Image (tube, rainbow, N blue to C red):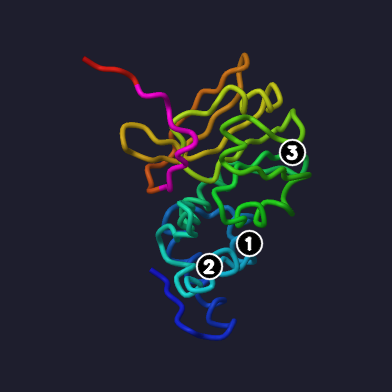
Amino acid sequence: MTIVEDRPEAGYEIARKAMIDSQLRTSGVNAPFVLRRMGEVPRERFVPEALRSVAYMDRAVPLGGGRWLPAPEVQGLMLQEALPKDSDRVLLVDGGSGYMAEVLRPLVASVEVIDPVAGASGKAEGSDFTLLMIDGAVEQIPQALIALLAPDGRIVTGHLSEGVTQVAVGRIAAGAAALLPVAEVGIPVLPEFAAPKKWTF
C-alpha cells in the first residue's frame, strides 16, 4: 500500500512511481503505454482532498455518493486489455472519478464520457463507438448500450458474477456481446447494471 502523508508534490511523484513498480508491474501490467500514462496522470487530483494521501493505495478509494476510484491494478489491467488505438472512438462509462478518461484521451481519437445512469439506459452522444470501457463491475451490459457500438466494437469492463468481480473483455458479434474473464480482482460494483433478480423455489 502506498500512502502519502501531507507532503509536497514530490511526495505524490514518489508514490506514483511506487504504484507502478509495486502494484502494476507485479500484477502483470507492463505495457509501456499504460505505465507511461498512469505515471503521468496524478491520481490525487481525482479523489476528495481529504483522501489525497491514500490516492495510490492498492484498493479502491471512496469518492462519496456510492462512487469509487478503482485500485491502480484494476485500471491498469483494463487499459492493457483495451489496447487503445489512435483511431478508436471510445465510449467510457465513468465510475465517478474522471481518472480513466484523463488517462485515455491522448491515446485515442475521442472519448465520450457518460455516467452509470446514462450507461444503463444507453444514452450517449453518438454511436458506432469502437471501444466500450466500463470503469467498474457490472452484472450485465444492457442491449441499449451495446447498440451504440460499431459492429466489430470491443468491450473492456469489470464483471460481477456470483459475488466475484473480474476484469473481462469482449467483442460485438451479431449485435450481442460475449465476455471473457481475464483476471479476478476486487472491482467496485456499479449497481445501475444489476441483472434482474430471478425467482427461485
Name the element at disc 3.
Answer: strand
Q: Which residue is mark 2?
A: 48
- Kindly state the secondary structure of the residue where label 2 is placed: loop
Residue, far left: 201
Residue at figure coordinates x 64%, y 55% from the top left: 33
Tell us which disc is closer to us: 2 or 3.
2
The front one of 87 and 98 is 98
33 is higher (above) or lower (below) than 17: above
First in sequence, mark 2 or 3: give its number: 2
Q: Viewer-nearest of labels 1 and 2?
A: 2
User: Which one is closest to the eye, mark 3 or mark 1?
Assistant: 3
Relative depth, front residue between 201 and 151 = 201
The residue beneath circle 3 is: 89
Marks 1 and 2, how far apart at CA? 24 Å
**Which numbered disc flags the more N-terminal residue, 3 or 1?**
1
- Provide the residue designation for mark 1: 36
Q: Nearer the viewer, residue 121 or 7?
A: 121
The percent position of residue 40, horizontal first and vertical second, equals: 64, 66
Q: Quadrant of the C terminus?
A: top left
Query: Label 2: how many residues lie within 10 Å, few (<14), some (14-19) or many (20+)?
Result: some
Above-or-below relation of 32 to 20: above
Label 3 with label 1: CB-CB less than 8 Å: no
Tell me if residue 124 is in the magenta stretch. no
In the image, residue 95 above or below residue 58: above
Q: Amino acid at mark 2?
A: Pro
| Amino acid type, residue under disc 1 in the picture | Arg
Q: Which residues are magenta?
A: 187-197
Q: Are marks 1 and 2 in contact (CB under 8 Å)?
A: no
Residue at 77 percent of width and 44 percent of height:
110
Rendering coords of residue 145 (x, y %): 62, 28
As shown in the figure, which amino acid type bears the numbered disc 3?
A: Arg
